[in-house]
Amino acid sequence: MLTALLLIWPVAAALLLHFVRGNAARALAFGASLVELALAVFMAIQFQVNSQPQFEINYPWLASVGINFHIGIDGLSLLLVLLTAFLVPLILLASFRHDYENPSVFYALVLFMQTGLIGVFVAMDAFVFYFFWEVALIPIYFLAGVWGGERRVQVTLKFFIYTVVGSLLMLAGFVYLYYMTGANGAVRSSDLAAFYNLRLSAAEQSWVFLLVFSAFAVKMPIFPLHSWQPDTYEQSPTPATMLLSGIMLKMGIYGTMRWVLPIVPLGVSQWSWVVMILAVIGIIYGALIAIRQRDMKRLIAFSSLSHVGLMIAGMFSLTAVGLQGTAVQMLAHGVNVVGMFFISDIIERRTGTRQIPELGGLTRATPLLSVTFLVILLGTVALPLTNGFVGEFLLLMGVYQYNPWLGAVAGLTIIFGAVYLLRMFQRVMLGPDSSFSSVIRDLTGAELAVLVPLILMVFWIGLFPGTFLHISEPAVNKLLVLINR
């Protein structure tokens, strides 16, 4: 019942938020997210590291048509459940410095979204997965559209169109797979195991791959389906941006690993070279555009596009190191990007601007901000002994094993990342002095409460990656068996 409780608890807290106002809504949402984190940690302690799903619940939902409410946890999904449960309290705490209109609704949407995200990571039935996929998307439309910036309406509409079209194509693919489980008189089922047992022709797998992967490609996103991302990240309120970048884009990567690679391996082999080329283009494109950015938030958004391109390339290398690198890099990227967006928000609240040329010399009065900013930035750059190094090293190994030339080009992400991120740090924090240099305040206790746990994770993943690789290894090996059958 632990898995069900992980889904029910945030919803129950979100409903209770409609009866409270102001600071009480903040406190209730934050307290509920801490309880969710405690449940996730308890589940991780009870988890037995193997390839089999655990904490399963499998009840008839639409029994007459073979659809069950089937959820469970394996090593891959456990990592993402932990990431979600870890980041949501920090995102809520980071939002306390802002006075949002209708705070009870705002925080209720965040908790509803948490349920959708965790539901995606634990679903073991295609239509349950699709249900939670949509549950996770709906709150972000309102968070961005109601509490976003001046261009929030047009930006949210663009995001809506992209995601809805992708979701409908995914649903069409799932419906086809569902009907194919009933071939030769068998009972139709939308269960993940039933999809794994399908033996479709190469042509069928090819177009099913295109249908299902389209939704995941938009959500990651992969070049050239990325155009919604920078504007949405920029115009959304910072907590929504953190949710989008830190957790929601992992839905697409996880969905591909769970619902594409092992189900349509022939389709994957047919299209993997196209995906690899697009991913590598995204790595270079995102990095080059990030170098030219003057807005901190947009720079981080394009940086995220570049790093996600490497995760996609490593995943489609279909190697053990590439898939393991994807698993651990999802954690590292979630930690780093949330920290980077939070620091950007801190600087904007204190100075009234995110424009890099208008800033400078902030480190003179903010030693704590400077140190925390630099640590998270170095994790993003993939400095050895930080979280980004482990994942990117494994990913580059996977891409190199797939194709040495693509591996060499993909490796430029580390060089480009150092260029645009260290240059941003130098111009914002080190000088020359700006009008804010002597008046800006250093970090508060509440802000340190957000940043210190992130920094601890930067070093935990970087120094002890085996903690996390050990959890995901059996699930990754099982995926490889299914892919290579």
Image (spheres, rainbow, N blue to C red):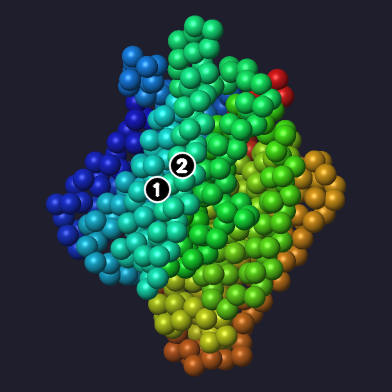
Residue annotated with mark 2: 167
Q: Which structural element holds mark 2?
A: helix
Is 3 displayed left or right of 429 in the figure? left
The picture places residue 34, in percent across and down from the top left corner, at 35, 48
The quadrant in which the N terminus is found is top left
Q: Residue at x 46, y 41 (%)?
A: 167
376 or 402: nearer the viewer: 402
Disc 1 residue type (three-letter): Leu
* Quarter of the rendering containing residue 115: top left
Q: Is residue 461 visible?
A: no
Residue annotated with mark 1: 137
Question: Is the C-beta separation of discs 2 and 1 under 8 Å?
Answer: yes
Is 429 displayed left or right of 143 in the figure? right
Q: Which structural element holds mark 1?
A: helix
Q: Nearer the viewer, mark 2 or mark 1?
A: 2
* Quarter of the rendering containing residue 285: bottom right
302 or 174: nearer the viewer: 174
Sequence-first tag of 2 and 1 = 1
The picture places residue 423, in percent across and down from the top left corner, at 66, 76
Q: Residue at x 54, y 7 (%)?
A: 184
CA separation in Å, label 2 and label 1: 10 Å
Up-down relation of residue 417 to residue 367 (above or below): above
The picture places residue 289, in percent across and down from the top left corner, at 65, 69
Q: Residue at x 49, y 78 (%)?
A: 354
205 or 21: nearer the viewer: 205
Q: Is residue 18 visible?
A: yes
Q: Residue at x 44, y 89 (%)?
A: 439
